[in-house]
Image (cartoon, helix red, strand yellow):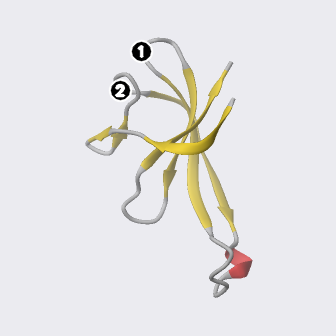
């Protein structure tokens, strides 16, 4: 299930958490879109590394980290 909007994740020493620390199971898978539209302010660019992660409750999450500063982590969805 993809969330309607990505949610920021807490992080400790640059590692993401969701109900505790997350274990990264797969990734990164780099997504870069919009590079051909540089200079067009109406088309945002995307530079992210996506990961599959698991939390202590056994939930499997789809998360990403922005490649641009401040390099925040976000929850994008859940695997059912």
Query: 35 or 76, which is in the foreground?
Result: 76
Rendered location of residue 25, percent (x, y): 54, 28
Q: Residues within 10 Å of mark 1 (few under 14, many from 20)?
A: few
Return the residue at label 2.
21
Query: 27 or 43, which is in the foreground?
Result: 43
Query: 66 or 76, which is in the foreground?
Result: 76
The C terminus - image quarter: top right
Q: Do labels 2 and 1 touch, CB within 8 Å? A: yes
Return the residue at label 1.
56
Rendered location of residue 58, percent (x, y): 51, 12
Left or right of 78? Residue 69 is left
Q: Which mark identifies residue 7?
A: none
Q: Residue furthest front?
A: 4
Rendered location of residue 68, percent (x, y): 46, 65
| Label 2: which secondary element | loop
| Label 1: which secondary element | loop
Residue name at image x 34 percent, y 38 percent: 10
Residue name at image x 56 percent, y 51 percent: 49
């Amino acid at each position: 299930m993809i969330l309607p909007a990505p949610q920021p994740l807490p992080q400790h020493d640059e590692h993401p958490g969701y109900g505790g620390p997350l274990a990264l199971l797969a990734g990164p898978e780099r997504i870069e879109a919009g590079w051909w539209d540089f200079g067009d302010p109406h088309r945002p660019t995307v530079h992210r590394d996506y990961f599959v992660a698991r939390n202590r409750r056994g939930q499997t999450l789809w998360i990403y980290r922005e490649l641009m500063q401040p390099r925040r982590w976000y929850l994008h969805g859940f695997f059912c």
